[in-house]
Amino acid sequence: MTQSRTIWLHVCDMGAIPRLGTRVLSHESGDIALFRTESDKVFALRDRCPHKGGALSLGIVHGEKVTCPLHAWNIDLATGEACAPDVGCAQRFAVRVEAGEVYVSLDAQAGGAADATALAAVV
């Protein structure tokens, strides 16, 4: 039995993600939104609301949630789960911040997609 090794991809400097804002990563399987909270926690979710597919990166970040701009669904940034009474989940990706640098794992074992190719930052 082989153990899977998490692959961490350098995305950007922490300063490239505005506080209470986002940065979008283009990936062949779909865009990924990186969210930075007021307390400097960084989360990554598929940039697609589980309700009608709205771009979560265009939403409002508050606390550890983002509000979808289309129909005001609140999505928990840590889990990707829609907050009650809404039901649904945005795919989440593991994030690591080291020495002010942000890394994302697209590895299935780290909470993300299986393919870690073709990642590019979009400003």
Image (cartoon, rainbow, N blue to C red):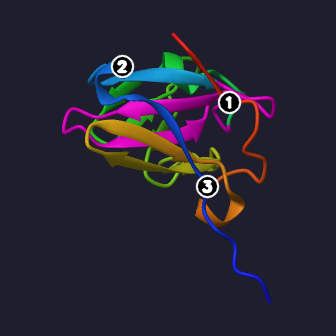
Q: Nearer the viewer, residue 113 or 45?
A: 113
Residue position marked by numbered label 2 in the rendering: 16
**Residues drawn in magenta:** 26-50
- Residue 67: x percent and y percent? 45, 29
First-in-chain label (3 vs 2): 3
Q: Is residue 32 magenta?
A: yes
Q: Residues within 10 Å of mark 2 (few under 14, many from 20)?
A: some
Query: Mark 1 to mark 2: distance in Å?
Result: 16 Å
Numbered disc 2: secondary structure: helix
Query: Mark 3 to mark 1: distance in Å?
Result: 13 Å
Q: Nearer the viewer, residue 54 or 35?
A: 35
| Rendered image: mark on residue 56 | none
Residue position marked by numbered label 1 in the rendering: 119
- Residue 16: x percent and y percent? 36, 19
Q: Please, which residue is most extreme toward the left here?
A: 39
Numbered disc 3: secondary structure: loop
Instruction: Name the residue at 77% across, 54% down.
Output: 114
Numbered disc 1: secondary structure: loop
Query: Mark 3 to mark 2: distance in Å?
Result: 22 Å
Residue position marked by numbered label 3 in the rendering: 7
- Residue 30: x percent and y percent? 75, 30
Quick check: 81 left or right of 40?
right
Instruction: Name the residue at 41% across, 32% down.
Output: 35
| Amino acid identity at mark 3 | Ile
First-in-chain label (3 vs 1): 3
Q: Is residue 74 magenta?
A: no
Q: Residues within 10 Å of mark 1 (few under 14, many from 20)?
A: some
